[in-house]
Amino acid sequence: MKNRELVTAFKKASASSGPTNDCVEVAHTADGGRAVRDSKDRDGGTQFHAPAAWAAFVGGVKAGAFEA
């Protein structure tokens, strides 16, 4: 990953409501990738994903690849 500079604030998914509020937050990086962190443990670390990896993940989600 070449650039880990965040260019947007972290945003939590709108579907993360409820009593436990378990979710991740995502921010855009300068190279077009994404940064991901746990909304309950914001200081626990951040994962950085290159643009192609993020696009593959989103494509898999949309295709239902992660459904049980």
Image (tube, rainbow, N blue to C red):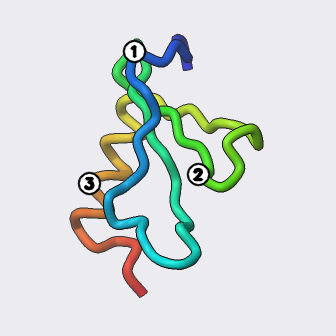
Q: Toward which corner of the image does residue 50 lie, by quadrant?
A: top left
Q: Toward which corner of the image does residue 27 lie, by quadrant?
A: top left
Mark 2 — residue?
39
**Mark 2: which amino acid?**
Ser
Marks 3/2: CA–CA distance: 23 Å
**Looking at the picture, how far across and down is residue 37, in whole percent?**
59, 44
Q: Between 25 and 19, which is closer to the camera in this rendering?
A: 19
Please, what secondary structure does the residue beneath circle 3 have?
Answer: helix
**Mark 3: which amino acid?**
Gly
The 10 Å Cα crowd at callout 3, few under 14, some 14 to 19, many 20 or more, is few
N-terminal of the pair, mark 1 or mark 3, is 1
In the image, taking residue 68 as reference, residue 58 lies left or right, namely left
In the image, taking residue 14 as reference, residue 34 lies left or right, namely right
**Looking at the picture, how far across and down is residue 4, in whole percent?**
55, 17
Mark 3 — residue?
59
Identify the mark at residue 44; answer none if there is no mark. none
**Looking at the picture, how far across and down is residue 30, in whole percent?**
41, 13
**Labels 1, 2: front one:** 2
